[in-house]
Image: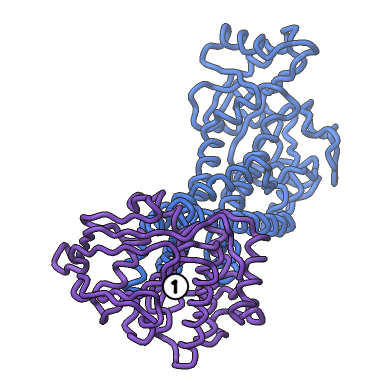
Chain colours: A blue, B purple
Amino acid sequence: MIFTNLRRHRVRTLIGMVGIALGVATMLSVVGLLGGAVRMFERILRNDSELLVFEKNVSDLFFSNVPVELAQKLREQSFVKAARPVLFAIIAAPGRPVVTCFGISADDPRFDGADWISGGAGDFRDDARGVVLGERAADFLNAKVGGTVTLGQEDWPVVGVVRMENGFENGGVFMPLAECQRAFHKDGVCSVVTVALADGAKTSEVKDWVSANFPRMTALENEEFSRSYSQFRIMKTTAWVVGGCAFLLGGLSVTNTMILSVFGRIRELAIARVCGFSRGQVAWMIFGESILISLMGIAAGWLLSSAGLRVLREVPQLQGYIEPTVGWVELAGAAALAMITALAGTLYPAWVAARLDPASALRFE
Amino acid sequence: MKTDETKPALHVIVRDAWKSFDRGRIEVLRGISIEVAHGEVVALLGSSGCGKSTLLNVISGLEPVESGEVLVDGRVVGDESTRIGLLRHHIGYVFQLHHLMPDLTLRENCLVPVVAARGDRNAGIKRLNKLAIATGIDHRLGQRVRELSGGERQRGALVRALINDPRLLLCDEPTGALDESNREKVFGLLLDLARAGGRTLIIATHDPAIAERCDRMIRIRDGKIAGEGVGS
């Protein structure tokens, strides 16, 4: 009966399915896009490390001030293989109000295995002013090795252009840490210290050490950081809220479809009751239709979002900035939300159908 | 048409049944009492609005009585589970309008009670084929209802009512919407299927000619028994 009902009301079924599909597609796309952006940020921060040390209670890492001394002392500990300070900053360039700057040390592993377009890792030195540009930054700043680039109030010699996989880095400027600190009036401090553990060392050793020696700082494992960093949380929450709103619309579409479905066949439902259908069977029939519509909508929405994200991945301007992918967790979450929304939206129509008085319905229909 | 020998025809008793609508302003059944024996064919004869349809609804449990008692095969018709059990296995209902689902095929329509009763679909299809041959609609089973003539639709409704081999058949003006030729065919079929199957048949009609062909006719006027007679 459920399949038959859906088959014989194809338009109605399609409308309900499209509503759910759009909800699922919107949610998966938004979650995929923002999740991809978060992953790219995470990759910048991780930088071949297991832990991040930053200032407690800062809403954004740009406001974090970690003494570089912390990195120096950490490096002396037996449980630490490497501790590298990184300073994040934003600077203006002619025609570009926002350029991301990375103040790093010359031994920073993000240049390891990088694709150098001109210059090389050896040209980037801690004791010099020379900056390395990401390929895209070199392009929009119209700069090349041997020339200079104007950043803020100063001209900076360009010593290398490198193609980075990460879009934020590819569009950014790498400065020697000391020069970056000077330019941004951050003497002696950095935004984060990335910590790589020595073999066999535990993350708790770093955490305890930081907590004991620099109580205003905190050390978090990369996973912990991703979960707790407010910016990431805002992005992830935004994704689910926007997706949730899309679901409300999708759910309303299913509700509307199912209400129309019930009120449009009062006589049929009455006949079904006369033929021996119980209230439960009638309600299940309505719920079953809703579940099937939702399942089809979820499948269609998944295909739609996969196709949309695939297209976005091919857009050159977005490459490197986001890695839009939909994981099983996101798919399961969206599917669960779709199902809950659809079932909630079907409660009223199913209740109406189950409460139907067949004799009255046949008398007046 | 062979029937299930283990299922005897049903005995119906209605005792002092009262039923009203519009919060008691319209009294439809006013203390009506009837008894229909096993395998008996009874006509409820009366003009429109006299309470015939309501009496059938009350017997099937589709509408509860306000006072009085209805017993089908000794069971009090009242609660939902009794009503569902009766409608699934023991009572077949035929209306003046066929009330088939227009977008379904005739076959799908006729199998609705099998689905409701959670019966064996294959056994249902076998019964359907036999009934369809007996009623002459076997060649139309794959057609959608809107593609059928009025007579075919009503014969389809009859097959649907009989698909679970009910022992009590309630018919509300089953030939009322048919032309004379189809009226005779459908009513003849109904009588044959009821009598051959040993079913109890209660038929509401305003047509004395039809009532006279039943074992007994009960005249209803203003929700009361106005008289009884013996048919042909």
Chain holding disc 1: B
**Vertical arrangement, residue B124 with respect to residue A36, above or below:** below
Residue A91: x percent and y percent?
59, 42
Q: How many marks?
A: 1
Residue at image location 62% in from the left, 40% down from the top: A38
The amino acid type, in three-letter code, at marker 1 is Val
Residue A124: x percent and y percent?
79, 33
Horizontally, residue B209 falls left or right of residue A302, namely: left
Q: Quadrant of residue A151?
A: top right
Horizontally, residue A193 falls left or right of residue A132, namely: left
- Does the image show residue B144? yes
Q: Quadrant of residue A181?
A: top right
- Determine which residue is flagged by label 1: B94
Q: Nearer the viewer, residue A108 or A94?
A: A108
Horizontally, residue A70 falls left or right of residue A215, namely: right
- In what quadrant of the picture does the N terminus of chain B appear? bottom right
Give the structural element (helix, strand or loop) at label 1.
Answer: strand
Q: Quadrant of residue B24?
A: bottom left
Residue at image location 54% in from the left, 41% down from the top: A235
Residue at image location 50% in from the left, 62% down from the top: B166
